[in-house]
Amino acid sequence: MRKPLIVGNWKMNKTVTESIGLIKEMIDFVQDYEQTEVVICPPFTSLWVARELIQDTNIVLGAQNISYHNEGAYTGEVSARMLQNIGCDYVILGHSERRSYFQESSEDVAKKVRQALNFGIKPIVCVGERLVERETGKAREIVSEEAAAIFEVLNKQEIVNIVFAYEPIWAIGTGKSATPQDASEIIKYIRTLVGNKYDETIAQHIRILYGGSVSPENIKSLMAEPDIDGALVGGASLQALTFSKLVKFQQLQL
Ligand code: 13P
């Protein structure tokens, strides 16, 4: 049985002061709720204070990126060892915003995945197609290429520590979520790819999230799809009450 996982990707939002306020409110809303695993991914500057605040709660810490270098003269980079030391359990890798604005290739993402695993941090690996690719029937091809670069560097023992997130780029920050059926179709496909490369037990074990305009209005129908194991949430994770509704989707009356 895969436990539902809701991840808040704060992107480049919230100062330290604002983060403290948001996290305190979130703790009030979601503490003691055990049915969902909750991860927040604040910006680097807020990780330490976040870690202090969420100690002894059910909220888990994640980061939004890492360097694929170990350490050294890489100005502006943050290493996996630094994130491990601060208490990050997860890191979002290969987000489409990093792939497109910072020219991260699938090979870069694979190197980062390796680096995260070397330090015991679980990567949440994002894959997903652009609108033009969806419209030209290339969604599966793109997702398959992006996933293959990860499979290339991981063996059976390692792949079980990965979470995949299917984030169609056209659905991110647009208010236009994929339909539960469309999201589920690609997520099933990713599960099949994992099964083909590794085995069926691993495919059934791995959690695959959906991301792209997830909100309290659509979370229940998305989570009703047996293959969708949770959500990677941008905008709706920046407001404590809204985020808590996603975490407690089982209780939403719609
Ligand atoms: P939105 O939820 O704001 O569409 O962002 C999705 C996302 O990119 C999460 O990583």
Image: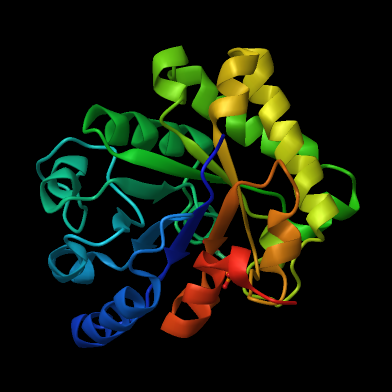
Q: Is residue 59 left or right of residue 93?
A: left
Q: Is residue 66 above or below residue 248?
A: above
For the residue pair 19 and 252, the one nearer the viewer reads as 252
> Whole-percent x and y of residue 129?
71, 50
For the residue pair 24 and 235, the one nearer the viewer reads as 24
Quadrant assignment for the C terminus: bottom right
Q: Is residue 77 above or below residue 2?
A: below
* Identity of the residue drawn at 12% across and 39% down: 71
Ligand 1 is found in which quarter of the picture?
Answer: bottom right
Q: Quadrant of residue 132?
A: bottom right
For the residue pair 141 and 252, the one nearer the viewer reads as 252
Q: Is residue 79 above or below residue 40?
A: above
For the residue pair 184 and 33, the one nearer the viewer reads as 33
* Identity of the residue drawn at 65% across and 16% down: 200
From this viewpoint, is residue 98 visible?
Answer: yes
Quadrant assignment for the N terminus: top right
> Whole-percent x and y of residue 154?
44, 19
Count how many numbered circles sit on residues in the image: 0
**What colouring method underlies this structural image?**
rainbow
Q: Is residue 40 left or right of residue 53?
A: right
Q: Is residue 228 left or right of residue 69?
A: right
* Identity of the residue drawn at 41% across and 56% down: 34
From this viewpoint, is residue 239 visible?
Answer: no
> Whole-percent x and y of residue 126?
54, 47
